[in-house]
Image (spheres, rainbow, N blue to C red):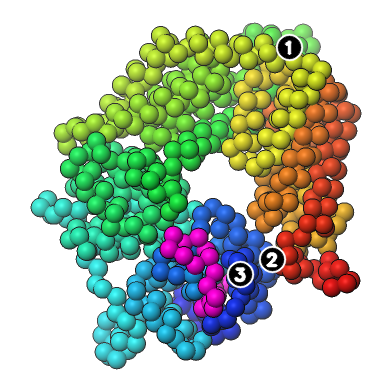
Amino acid sequence: MSDTNAAGGSGPEIISPELISLDTDLGTTKEDVIRSLAARLTAAGRASDAAGLVDAALAREAQSATGLPGGIAIPHCRAEAVSSASLGFARLDPKVDFGAPDGPADLVFLIAAPEGAGAEHMKLLSSLARALVRPAFVTSLREASTPDEIVRLVDEVLNPAPKDAPAKAAAATPTPPVSTGKHATEEAPAPTPAERHIVAVTACPTGIAHTYMAADSLVAAGERAGVKVHVETQGSSGSTPLDPSVIAGAAAVIFATDVGVKGRDRFAGKPVVASGVKRAINEPDKMLAEALRASENPAAATVDGTAAAAADSDAGSVGFGTHLRQVLLTGVSYMIPFVAAGGLLIALGFLLGGYEISGPAKDIVLNNSITNLPDGGLATYLGAVLFQIGSLAFSFLVPALAGYIAFAIADRPGIAPGFTAGAVAVFVGAGFIGGLVGGLIAGVVALYIGRIAVPQWLRGLMPVVIIPLFATLVVGALMFIVLGRPLAAITSGLTDWLNGLSGSSAIFLGIILGLMMCFDLGGPVNKAAYAFAVAGLNVNDPATLRIMAAVMAAGMVPPLAMALASTVLRPKLFSEAERENGKAAWLLGSAFISEGAIPFAAADPLRVIPSMMAGGAVTGALIMAFDVTLSAPHGGIFVFFAVGGIGWFLVSLAAGTVVAALAVVGAKEFFRKGPSDAELDPEIVPAAA
């Protein structure tokens, strides 16, 4: 390869001989292989920190396996530790399991991109991933005898010879079959009405490899079946949306994604087959056949991981449970900004006007002004204004939850019926539970109305008029006539039960909430506990204020505990990247951002997560035992003015933080994973070793 990188500027080559290991034993696990390749990249100056690169690659592995059929694995990541886009390659003997459905891998590419990698570099890395679906290229990798030959093979994939180059240059690598299917990025011409074609969208969380491999696999399957497949790749190297005329004329749609489809409403009214992105790589012919059957019988289509997708959960499909979790998390994620903005404004209103402002705030705002101050003066007036703004923002909590749950199921046509369902839930007193149920119903109804076959001329009205109108009518009627009162009764009963908790019962609830907040550090269990506390928050109800205090204090424990352990108690047990993360975790924990502990948990979940849960349980129990209250739903140390019993709050938080920090230090000290731990710092190796 030349001294100019493949992206067109000066800089290191994407791959070079020192990044290649042929026919070697790199260990028995994928972690061993990734560590070895990361060490090569770091030694070659491609990364500043091997441990940081390993952590990022293993975090991606935790999302879904990177093993592919045919003995191939493509661990990949984007990380701050990576200084330039690079490829590490190993031909393994013996093979190592990377989770492929047909067995372990002997060809492994570690694809490493900088956190802010440019589009050109991402296109190069995706070109390599696409080449790995070509049997001839894979065979040439197995037959290569030297690292230089591997470099040449990869270079010819990343920098293909011009069309007018000599024949011998074009023959240097086996020629892949010419594709008659077109990707969106190739500016496929709109098909004629007589052509039967399928459109597809592929996307994976990282957007480096699987996105493009799935696209090429589907196109190749279309070539074998005599059907054109037009693919929109929603990946890191950019995406050109499919031409609307191509979508309009498509017989069916394939969604091969592990993340949400951007612009899903463009495909309204089309039969859809959906799965995880890996299924399109492993079984493209089967997915194409399902899409063709769906085009003839739309009722047989699968949507968002049901039916055929569920049958292939091991291959990365989106099963019902996973999809339900994604849907609920979407609703909660969109709800949180309303909680943060509204809750903090309410807390500031209390700070200025006192807790008694909650009653007369509306009248004060309507009947007074900056030049006509109420009793109590400027502070009372501004407190009432802030409280009223916060209350209005907070009132969108349940409608936003329901609206974006419906959005996650049915895309934009689900928003209006979802918000309406949430508003009805508030009106009838069904609260948070009513929002969850109403959002799910609204999304499902909107989704199924959108699947009704309608004439071509009516399709344009479906997502903006027909679906929102009838879905809103159906879910509104159900909530008012059938579900509203039972859900309100459940909510009322739950509230009464919480108000009656005292003594050991309250402490037990605190333990449960503490465990939930620390279990997945911002994941669905954490969000469920948080949403439960926020939805019930009522300044006139001490039980809800204790629950809010327990949830926020326990949620602060993980980042603070990892900061304490990695920067104060035992820094040598942690990698350099983790020590740097620990410094930032002090602030993140203080601000009640549990996600600050994710880098530690992703690298070592079996020792970090149980330790955090132990600390969270201690904090939750103590908050309940000491009757600590909290009137603000977010903010950490920045809303200490809203804490009732601030001294006991700090004691509870400190106790849980210390317990969690000592537990994780003990787990790392006495329950080592193996020799790989010693790579973090030579000083942690026992003297006897």
Q: Is residue 662 left or right of residue 163?
A: right
Q: Is residue 598 left or right of residue 30?
A: right
> In this rendering, is residue 615 above or below 467?
below
Marks 3 and 1: CB-CB under 8 Å?
no
Res 166 quadrant in image = bottom left
The tag earlier along the polypeptide, 3 or 1, is: 3
Which of label 3 and label 2 is nearer to you?
3
Res 355 quadrant in image = top right
Residue 310 location (% of width, % of height) = 40, 43
> In the rendered image, which residue does mark 3 sit on?
28
- The answer to whether residue 539 is visible is no
Q: Is residue 89 magenta?
A: yes
Front-most of residues 520 and 335: 520
The structure residue drawn at horizontal position 51% and vertical position 78%, both measured from the top left corner, is: 91
The structure residue drawn at horizontal position 26% and vertical position 73%, both measured from the top left corner, is: 177
The tag earlier along the polypeptide, 3 or 2, is: 3
Q: Mark on residue 500?
A: 1
Task: Determine crowd level at label 2: few under 14, some 14-19, many 20+ residues with C-alpha closer than 10 A.
Answer: many
> In the rendered image, which residue does mark 2 sit on?
51
Find the distance from the CA under tag 2 to the CA under tag 1: 50 Å
Residue 616 location (% of width, % of height) = 76, 37
Q: Secondary structure at mark 3?
A: loop
> In this rendering, is residue 682 above or below 516?
below
Find the distance from the CA under tag 3 to the CA under tag 2: 19 Å
- Seen as rendered, the residue at the extreme left is 194
- The answer to whether residue 26 is visible is yes
Q: Amino acid at mark 3?
A: Thr
Q: Is residue 85 magenta?
A: yes
Front-most of residues 16 and 369: 16
Q: Amino acid at mark 2?
A: Ala
